[in-house]
Amino acid sequence: MELKARKDVPTALTWDLSSIYATEDEMYADVEKLKALAGRMVKDYKGKLNTPQVINSCLDDQRELERLFTLTGTYCDLAVSVDYYDTYNQERNEKLSRLFAEISSSLSFIDSEIVEQDEATLEKAMEMTTANKHYLADVLRGKPHKLHPEAERALAALSQSLGAPYQIYNMAKLADMKFDAFSVGEKEYPLGYSLFEDDYEYERDTQVRRTAFAAFSRKIKEYENVTAAAYNTQVQTEKTMATLRGFPSVFDSLLFPQKVTRDLYNRQIDLITEKLAPHMRKYARLLQRIHGLDKMTFGDLKIAVDPEYDPKVTIEESKAYIEKGLSILGEDYVEMVRTAYRDRWVDFAQNAGKSTGGFCASPYGKNSFILLSWNNRMADVFTLAHELGHAGHFKACNEAQSIFDTNVSGYFVEAPSTMNELLMAHYLLKTNPDKRFRRWVLSCMISNTYYHNFVTHLMEAAYQRKVYEIVDAGGSVNAEVLNGLMKETLQKFWGEDVIISDDAARTWMRQPHYYMGLYSYTYSAGLTVATQACKRIEREGQPAVEDWKKVLAAGSTLDPIGLAKCAGIDITTDQPLLDTIAYIGEIIAQIEKLTDELEG
């Protein structure tokens, strides 16, 4: 069936943005507060940030400014994300973005003046308050890459334009791209971005699945040049910014805010590409055997091991799975899950113009907002558990930390979310000894958790690294180059076991993460931490759970190495990653063994 317009979606399936602002007028009232506060800060502090007291007074005001930025920006941005056809919400969001750029430009003097103060002044300022301490430390850390105050002011004023590539990508993908229906036999099937990614990719009927993939690929091919142009603009801008700020490469620039080294970044890509590939090829061969496929194509990789045993799960039924699966994290955590359902934190709806995939936004001082499209699959339960992991993480750190200390490194940020997927799977394994059931749960772990985070996103990261290497060397990319890079990346990983077609090569067009810096690789980094922490919880019980809760509440007061250490994991060595890859191999071996036993 065709996707509904947003206005025709039942309210119960949508999130409730009134928990941020009851009315649009209330939002605009905060916009006026924001403008007034920014104006006063210019008057009170410009040229005067030369004592610990004045510096902290300014940063106290800036924390309130950040809160208002976050609330008003989130309210408007979330409204756009569920319906890119709504021009009113788009125009409102654009208006707010312009205002944010103007305010950021007018206040760019703050960091510029702070970094010019002597060390004793800044140390005294840091001693005076914990709320601003880490912010000041980060300002000092970035001092070598700070530009002239007027240059910083100009760049802040251009922030909306610098973000244009991502906006162009989303508009092409979610507003302009219209899919025609496709036919198999005498039956016609509707097609759309979310219909393909959330439904047809998992379709058990091989002819329908492969025809849908071909039809979907034909349509996105029509937009490959504009998508490539937007992406090339993005990476060229990032390279220019890296050079301006004195970073030796674009990699160093993008990893700087994550507080991790090139070695940690490269290790994730290199070790997984080398060590995990044999296990995943074995899994691909198993899928081909189970389904009796004539060949294994890229479009076949998401089919279920046992589609007849893949139960349909309603939104109501998912509550019990998630509440019980995450109960090990404590009653407070389970109560958060109940509240998320009851108070409409989640946008479950399927409608035209809605963002694809899933995400969680957690504005400071408010509840989280989770976007996904519910298809009554167990995969949706794992996705929701994943996003609730983000919600639980930021509930803990937002309550415990200053707003300045909630910007958690991207290297770690996917650990709490993927941890929830693992806890869900481990709970399910304990509920039923039946071989078919256990095979189903184990296959969910591979297809929903590890395939998505350790393979899909890792392949994106390996491809993305090649793009940045070209850009770092002074080159540029276009659709032909990007198709070639993605095809080469996929072929290297899957070898002779999976056919990588030209349609598969266009997978790069589907991922918004490329507009978020070096983000794709962080899924495997987070899942490595989560796997090791989950295994520790299985071994040690409550002490490990309590350590994990401390990690969630720490926010960005610790770097990724420190956060992992707090959870009992040493990510300065290869061992956690190698252990996780071996664990994935063990799961696939168990699936194969259970398949042999069930078929025997």
Image (tube, rainbow, N blue to C red):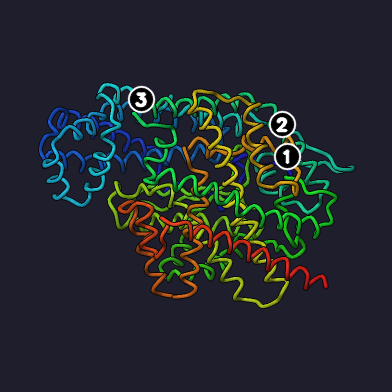
Residue drawn at x 52%, y 56% is 386
- Residues under labels 1 and 3: Cα distance? 44 Å
**What number is the disc on residue 244?**
3
Q: Do the CB atoms of the residues marked 1 and 2 lie less than 8 Å apart?
A: yes
Indicate which label's residue lies in the foreground, 1 or 2: 2
The kind of secondary structure element at disc 2 is helix
The image position of residue 204, as x and y in percent, is: 78, 54
The image position of residue 343, as x and y in percent, is: 47, 57
Q: Amino acid at mark 3?
A: Leu
**What number is the disc on residue 191?**
1
User: Foreground: 477 or 221?
Assistant: 477
- Residues under labels 1 and 2: Cα distance? 10 Å
Instruction: Decide if residue 294 is in sight here.
Output: yes
User: Looking at the image, is mark 3 or mark 2 earlier in the sequence?
Assistant: 2
User: Looking at the image, is mark 1 or mark 3 earlier in the sequence?
Assistant: 1
Q: Which residue is mark 2?
A: 219
**In-image side of 306 versus 524 (left or right):** right
Indicate which label's residue lies in the foreground, 1 or 3: 3
**Image quarter hosting the C terminus:** bottom right
